[in-house]
């Protein structure tokens, strides 16, 4: 209808979004374990014996209650894929996009679970050789959850 | 002849102001585990539940695809799944159509909500059109106060008549073990409670609430094998009206009238007041029950005040409305309509215990979504 640029307007809001999400007891257990004991814990399904990660009250595969057989995921794993992020990513903690220096990766833990996290190595050439990795935990200021691990560091074997 | 569809199992959590001990999936599973346990069904391809339909809301839950967190709990992993981002009665409607079509013969539905997780006013403001309504900061309380004022002035409805709804429903809630806020209050207590948005007072409004409701729907053949007391969906319809309040006659609730008339026609109900013995309707604010009476054809336009005065809708009246205590006694948005239908199922089975109405054969469930009842859904059930 119009080609008048003055009439094509952007309406912007900067609204705070405040939510208080409950972890529930399964995710709560996993959060408490990272915070207190620097370890990743998942619950093993009472039927198929697979580890459910992130922890759930019901096994998605068997569709029965998982129960509370907690097992450690361990700190070591193998990088399956990684991506080197050039564009800034949205940081929900500060409500804006910012460049993150550490590449994102999909890691298969030696316990069999797959987790999403970051890699310590930032050099694109050296990244190509990163296979075996180990979690580097925050020594101080752990709040519970995946941010209690700083990143995964390349290890031998 | 289309398939008949029955509700064969229902469950609700107890409604609570703040279930901080559980996340949405765990909360939903409290109701889901009951209906699975009661029917002995599973999700196997050979004769199990073939579809899960949940109702929840992205803004309320603070995540798009708000059904993600209940995926495991509702048995939807690697299965046929759907979400209705509207009041839960629409989820039952959606499940009904899948069974009527012959595509499914067993469907689980679940509606879940934790209102305690977010600020109600913020969420409601986010549902508003951003160009013309949102900048004013209005929420459903403000909009409903405008609707209440419009309705009360047009028909001479008094604050006392609205207060009677709050007294009736919170009083009825004393017989409902799932109710969050059973209260013995008087009309004066309501009229003396804090003004929230004039003319709506604290006790005219429902409290913040967390809870879930689940059901299993079945084709006639499966229903007969699963229960001796199937409750049939005889009629159902919904209707949507304009978002912008200026486009609507706020004292008329035209969408509700249309939805109700279509549902009655389908159920072959000609005189709802005589043919229906029990109704459970969603009323976030007390004036709404009076306004919805007329929309549901239980009285003429503007006669809601006279209907509550007559005592017909009290427990023991010929058409008890909200024996459970309704939403005013504390039921979350989104869960509202499904929990209304669950209550009607219990009534028609004769299993409503202390809140049981005597021998009902036909019951009415109502739910709405959005500001001032923008989307209305009506369901007629029979035993
Ligand atoms: Zn399993």
Image (cartoon, coloured by chain):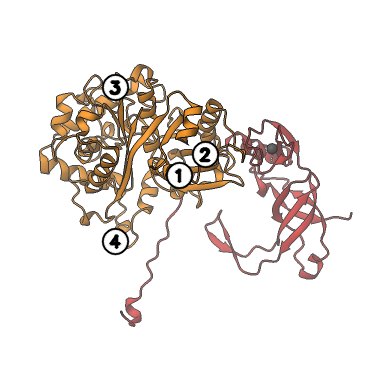
Lateral position of residue A47 relative to residue B27, left or right? right
Asked if disc 1 and disc 2 are in contact, CB closer than 8 Å, the reply is yes
**Quadrant in which the N terminus of chain B appears:** top left
Which chain is rendered orange in the image? B
Q: Nearer the viewer, mark 1 or mark 4?
A: 1
Percent x, y of residue B363: 31, 30
Looking at the image, tell me whether mark 3 or mark 2 is earlier in sequence order.
2
Among the chains pictured, the one given red colouring is A
- The residue carrying mark 2 is B24
Q: Earlier in the sequence, mark 1 or mark 3?
A: 1
Where does label 3 land, which residue? B171
The Cα atoms of the two marked residues, 1 and 4, are separated by: 26 Å
Residue B12, horizontal then vertical, whole percent: 45, 29
Label 4: state its secondary structure. Answer: loop
Q: Are marks 1 and 2 on the same chain?
A: yes
Residue for badge 1:
B56
Which quarter of the figure is the C terminus of chain B placed in?
top left
Q: How far apart, in angstroms, are the residues tagged by discs 3 and 2?
A: 29 Å
Q: Residue furthest front?
A: B1
Image region (quadrant) for ligand 1? top right
Chain of the residue where label 1 is placed in the rendered structure: B
Q: Residues at badges 1 and 4 in contact (C-beta under 8 Å)? A: no
Query: Can the viewer see residue B214?
Result: no
Q: Are marks 4 and 3 in contact (CB under 8 Å)?
A: no
Q: Residue at x 38, y 28 (%)?
A: B345
Left or right, residue B303 beside residue B29 = left
Q: Which residue is mark 4?
A: B132
Using the image, tell me which numbered label, if any, was put on residue B230. Answer: none
């Amino acid at each position: 209808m119009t080609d008048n640029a003055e009439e094509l307007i952007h309406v912007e809001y900067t609204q705070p979004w405040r939510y208080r999400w409950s972890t529930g007891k399964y995710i709560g257990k996993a959060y408490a374990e990272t915070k207190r004991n620097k370890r990743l814990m998942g619950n093993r399904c009472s039927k198929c014996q697979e580890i459910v990660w992130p922890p759930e009250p019901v096994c998605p595969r068997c569709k029965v209650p998982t129960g509370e057989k907690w097992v450690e995921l361990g700190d070591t794993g193998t990088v399956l894929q990684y991506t080197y992020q050039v564009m800034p990513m949205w940081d929900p903690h500060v409500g804006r996009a910012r460049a993150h220096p550490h590449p994102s990766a999909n890691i298969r833990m030696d316990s069999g679970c797959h987790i999403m996290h970051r890699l310590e190595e930032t050099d694109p050439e050296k990244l190509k050789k990163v296979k075996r990795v180990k979690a580097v935990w925050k020594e101080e200021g752990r709040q519970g959850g995946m941010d209690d691990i700083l990143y995964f560091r390349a290890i031998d074997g | 002849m289309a398939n008949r569809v029955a509700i064969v199992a229902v469950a609700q959590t107890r409604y609570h102001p703040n279930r901080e001990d559980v996340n949405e999936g765990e909360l939903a599973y409290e109701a889901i585990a009951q209906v699975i346990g009661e029917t002995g069904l599973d999700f196997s391809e050979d004769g199990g539940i073939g579809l899960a339909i949940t109702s929840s809301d992205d803004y309320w839950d603070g995540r798009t695809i708000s059904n993600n967190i209940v995926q495991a709990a509702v048995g939807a992993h690697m299965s046929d799944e759907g979400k209705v981002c509207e009041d839960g009665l629409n989820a039952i409607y959606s499940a009904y159509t899948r069974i009527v079509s012959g595509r499914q013969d067993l469907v689980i539905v679940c509606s879940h909500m934790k209102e305690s997780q977010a600020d109600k006013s913020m969420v409601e403001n986010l549902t508003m059109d951003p160009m013309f309504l949102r900048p004013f900061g209005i929420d459903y309380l403000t909009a409903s106060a405008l609707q209440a004022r419009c309705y009360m002035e047009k028909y001479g409805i008094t604050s006392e008549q609205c207060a009677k709804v709050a007294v009736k429903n919170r009083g009825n809630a004393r017989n409902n073990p799932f109710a969050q806020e059973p209260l013995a209050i008087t009309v004066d207590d309501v009229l003396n409670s804090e003004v929230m948005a004039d003319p709506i007072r604290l006790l005219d409004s429902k409290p913040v609430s967390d809870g879930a409701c689940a059901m299993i729907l079945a084709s006639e053949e499966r229903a007969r094998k699963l229960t001796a007391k199937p409750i049939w969906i005889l009629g159902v319809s919904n209707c949507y009206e304009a978002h912008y309040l200026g486009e609507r006659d706020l004292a008329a609730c035209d969408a509700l009238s249309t939805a109700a008339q279509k549902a009655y026609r389908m159920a072959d109900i000609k005189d709802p007041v005589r043919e229906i013995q029990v109704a459970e309707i969603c009323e976030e604010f007390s004036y709404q029950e009076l306004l919805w009476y007329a929309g549901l054809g239980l009285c003429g336009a503007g006669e809601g005040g006279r209907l509550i005065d007559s005592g017909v809708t009290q427990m023991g009246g010929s058409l008890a409305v909200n024996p459970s205590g309704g939403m005013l006694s504390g039921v979350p948005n989104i869960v509202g309509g499904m929990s209304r239908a669950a209550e009607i199922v219990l009534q028609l089975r004769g299993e409503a215990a202390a809140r049981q109405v005597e021998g009902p054969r036909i019951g009415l469930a109502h739910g709405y979504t959005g500001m001032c009842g923008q989307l209305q859904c009506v369901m007629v059930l029979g035993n």
